[in-house]
């Protein structure tokens, strides 16, 4: 039995959804053109006016926005409402320079929380559930978004934020948490800690987890499901478009339904910017159809994925996006080969290692060095030096089979790679490539 937060929208016919999207886009383009001089200037340069946009079929005529535009326009340059109408900001972690600051009206927050409520209900959440939110609060969108969604659904909400894992587990047990929301790497860490405490999934009541904010693989999903005894669901979002809840997984666990009444998705060729047909792999671009304060038109996410309209057994008609398969910008090119951390993670888990690893890339005498530090479990750590060296060689072979290039693999002692409570740092690239 499928659960919906807003059945009328989530199961809307294709024709009705297109009509709604067309109306909203036309109004949004007018709103942005009249209120955001920065974007008006981009449109003028491209020779486009709001009159040229009659429906979503005309979207390709509009200019793209990128992270660079957001930095150039920082802090108020893309604001489309007076500050007196704005009630909150959220901000990215600023891993690539100047922070991105996004603004929200009260209506923006209501719609965002509504999207998060859809995600919680899709994993079986009701007002009977205890929802433990261990995403970071504050400027990070994870905590506030799912906190608001959980309130809307009527769950008892535990606003734990991240960290203090012993306390997380104590509340989880004492209050009988049934849904947990956090990064996948933190979920795995909670699972490892439970195990160390001599507890099993039978000692907790979790049934579902909503995990996002960093890339993770199918192998890691199965691992977390085993450690915590729950079903692990993906959620997708960007601070730039509001936060988590742009797209969410249903019980099918085969990709995320995009809340396309609020966010219009396109897939483009990252090189040429050309829109690709449905089913093609390319870069995901989002247009906010309902955001008031900070509406981004054709924002390039840099996430590589595929969109699909295949019928879903959950009954939702919302278009689905695959799990991002890496990014068009943080994909590493090592010795001429495209390398995504997720490929390495898949090999590690397949070989029986936990997904705690750190990739280090450097360039020495014009040649790329490629080192992977991989944490061993306590059992693996007790092996002899000779056995550990043998395991390192086996991993080198397995990774070479997938990537076509030889890394240096270093098996390191348990718990020696720093655990992250926010986004896990998986890559240190010391090459000066810019």
Image: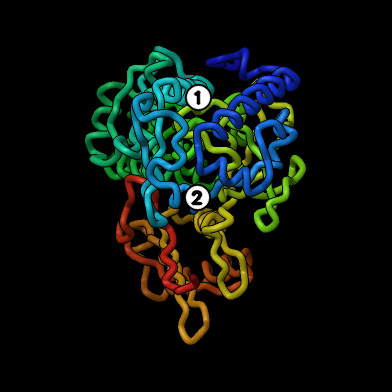
- How many numbered markers are drawn? 2
Camera-nearest residue between 144 and 16: 16
Q: Please tell me whether residue 117 is drawn above or below residue 88 in the rendered image.
A: above
Query: For the residue labelled by badge 2, is the local secondary structure a helix, a strand or a loop?
Result: helix
For residue 69, which numbered disc appears in the image?
Answer: 2
Query: For the residue labelled by badge 1, is the local secondary structure a helix, a strand or a loop?
Result: helix
Dot 1: few (<14), some (14–19), or many (≥20) neighbours within 10 Å?
many
Residue most extreme to the bottom: 365
Q: Residue at x 39, y 35 (%)?
A: 142
- Residue 200 can be seen, yes or no: no
Res 130 quadrant in image: top left
Residue 21 lies, in percent from the top left, at 66, 25
Q: Residue at x 40, y 33 (%)?
A: 103
Res 416 quadrant in image: bottom left
Residue 410 lies, in percent from the top left, at 41, 70
Q: Please tell me whether residue 419 is drawn above or below residue 90 in the rendered image.
A: below
**Horizontally, is 88 left or right of 69 in the view?**
left
Q: Residue at x 73, y 35 (%)?
A: 58
**Horizontally, is 180 left or right of 238 in the view?**
left
Q: Please tell me whether residue 222 is drawn above or below residue 245 in the rendered image.
A: below
2 vs 1, front mark: 2
Residue 9 lies, in percent from the top left, at 62, 17
Task: Name which of mark 2 and mark 1 comes first in the sequence.
Answer: 2
* Residue on which disc 1 sits: 115
- Residue 43 can be seen, yes or no: yes
Res 422 quadrant in image: top left
Q: From the image, which quarter does the N terminus lie in?
A: top right
Residue 160 lies, in percent from the top left, at 28, 31
Dot 2: few (<14), some (14–19), or many (≥20) neighbours within 10 Å?
some
Q: Residue at x 62, y 24 (%)?
A: 24
């Amino acid at each position: 039995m499928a659960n919906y937060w807003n059945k009328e929208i989530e199961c809307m016919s294709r024709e009705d959804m297109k009509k709604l999207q067309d109306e909203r886009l036309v109004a949004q383009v007018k709103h942005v053109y009249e209120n955001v001089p920065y974007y008006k200037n981009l449109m003028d340069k491209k020779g486009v006016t709001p009159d040229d946009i009659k429906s979503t079929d005309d979207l390709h005529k509009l200019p793209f926005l990128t992270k660079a535009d957001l930095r150039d326009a920082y802090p108020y340059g893309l604001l489309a409402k007076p500050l007196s109408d704005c009630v909150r900001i959220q901000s990215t972690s600023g891993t690539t320079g100047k922070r991105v600051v996004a603004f929200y009206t009260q209506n923006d927050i209501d719609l965002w929380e509504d999207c998060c409520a859809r995600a919680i209900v899709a994993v079986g959440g009701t007002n009977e559930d205890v929802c433990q939110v261990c995403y970071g609060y504050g400027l990070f969108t994870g905590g506030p978004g799912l906190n608001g969604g959980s309130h809307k659904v009527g769950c008892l909400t535990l606003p734990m934020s991240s960290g203090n894992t012993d306390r997380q587990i104590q509340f989880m047990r004492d209050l009988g948490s049934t849904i947990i929301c956090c990064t996948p790497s933190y979920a795995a860490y909670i699972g490892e800690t439970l195990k160390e405490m001599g507890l099993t999934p039978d000692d907790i009541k979790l049934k579902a987890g909503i995990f996002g904010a960093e890339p993770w693989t199918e192998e890691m999903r199965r691992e977390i499901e085993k450690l915590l005894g729950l079903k692990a669901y993906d959620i997708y979002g960007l601070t730039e478009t509001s936060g988590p809840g742009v797209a969410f997984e249903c019980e099918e666990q085969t990709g995320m339904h995009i809340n396309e009444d609020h966010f219009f998705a396109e897939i483009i060729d990252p090189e040429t910017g050309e829109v690709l047909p449905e089913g093609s792999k390319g870069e995901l671009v989002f247009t906010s159809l309902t955001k008031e304060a900070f509406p981004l038109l054709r924002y390039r996410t840099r996430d590589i994925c595929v969109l699909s309209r295949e019928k879903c057994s959950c009954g939702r008609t919302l278009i689905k996006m695959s799990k991002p398969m890496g990014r068009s910008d943080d994909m590493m090119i090592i010795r001429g080969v495209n390398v995504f951390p997720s490929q390495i993670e898949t090999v590690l888990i397949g070989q029986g290692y936990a997904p705690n690893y750190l990739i280090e890339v450097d360039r020495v005498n014009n040649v790329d060095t490629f080192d992977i530090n991989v944490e061993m479990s306590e059992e693996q750590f007790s092996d002899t030096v000779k056995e550990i060296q043998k395991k390192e060689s086996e991993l080198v072979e397995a990774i070479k089979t997938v990537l076509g290039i030889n890394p240096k693999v270093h098996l390191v002692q348990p718990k020696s790679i720093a655990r992250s409570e926010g986004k896990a740092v998986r890559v240190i690239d010391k090459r000066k490539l810019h």
